[in-house]
Amino acid sequence: MTPFAEELLAAYRAGRRVAPEGRLPASAADAYAVQSQLCAALGPVAGFKVGLKPEGPPIMAPILAARCFNAGASVPVDDRMGVELEVGWQITGPLPAPESADLETALARVVRPVPVIELVDTRIAGAASQDPWVKLADLQINYGLVLGTPMADWDGRDFGALRGRMRAGTQNLLDGETSVPGGSALATLAALYRTIGTHCGGLQRGHVVITGTLHPLTYLPGGTPVSGEIEGLGAVSVTLA
């Protein structure tokens, strides 16, 4: 394990932020190597977050099973926690070959949509916290995931343009029309699946893949109730304690 990965692992285990002294990751390959080391030490993965890029492959980060919560949970907060309402995909069956000709259609047969709130926080203190490769190594600053109820009667239609609501205390973070980043939640899932290979164990049945925020990332203090709803999909909530 690299010195930076050891520092980051210590921060995870202690529940604190660290100003790293080891050599910082300088590429996506460096960052993904740190992700793998963290997952090997911190336990099983419950899914992945993915972000599309205008050029090149998407970025990805595992979500730790220990940081997944059911809707209505109370999650402790230190100084602040970021929240994002997103469309998730829960994998329910054997995945097709990633080189399948119509991959999005094939994936739609083995997933079901689920509303989620991503929890966002960094384990890095100081200027390094703004470095993009450091963020990627730090699981793309994912803290955890709050899961709503998967949609049992989904008809297979994609999620792109939609309507949603997200409220945090007295603040409206979203109320009305919005869209999945990139315009297609299924295309985002397919992009991840083509890229991920065996990284941190690869995609597995039961995993949840999240597809990007429907509103600007917002940081909130403890003591804030948060509730979101995606029309046609469902609701999800969490209390930041």
Image (cartoon, helix red, strand yellow):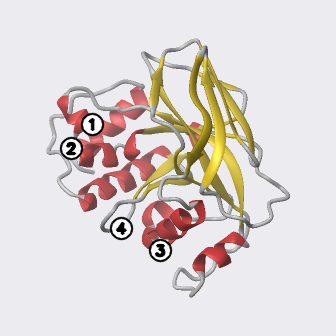
Is mark 4 in CB contact (under 8 Å) with mark 3? no
Residue wearing tag 4: 57
Q: Are marks 1 and 2 in contact (CB under 8 Å)?
A: yes
The circle drawn on residue 7 is 1
Extreme residue toward the bottom, this view: 101
Q: Which residue is mark 2?
A: 3
Q: Nearer the viewer, mark 1 or mark 4?
A: 4
SS at circle 1:
helix
The x, y position of residue 239, in whole percent, is 64, 21
User: Relative to 80, does residue 51 appear above or below in the rendering?
Assistant: below
Relative to 44, does residue 76 appear above or below in the rendering? Answer: above
Residue shown at 37% from the left, 24% from the top: 16
Residue 185 appears in which quarter of the rendering?
Answer: bottom right
The secondary element bearing badge 3 is classed as helix
In this rendering, position of residue 84 left or right of residue 158? left
Which residue position holds label 3? 194
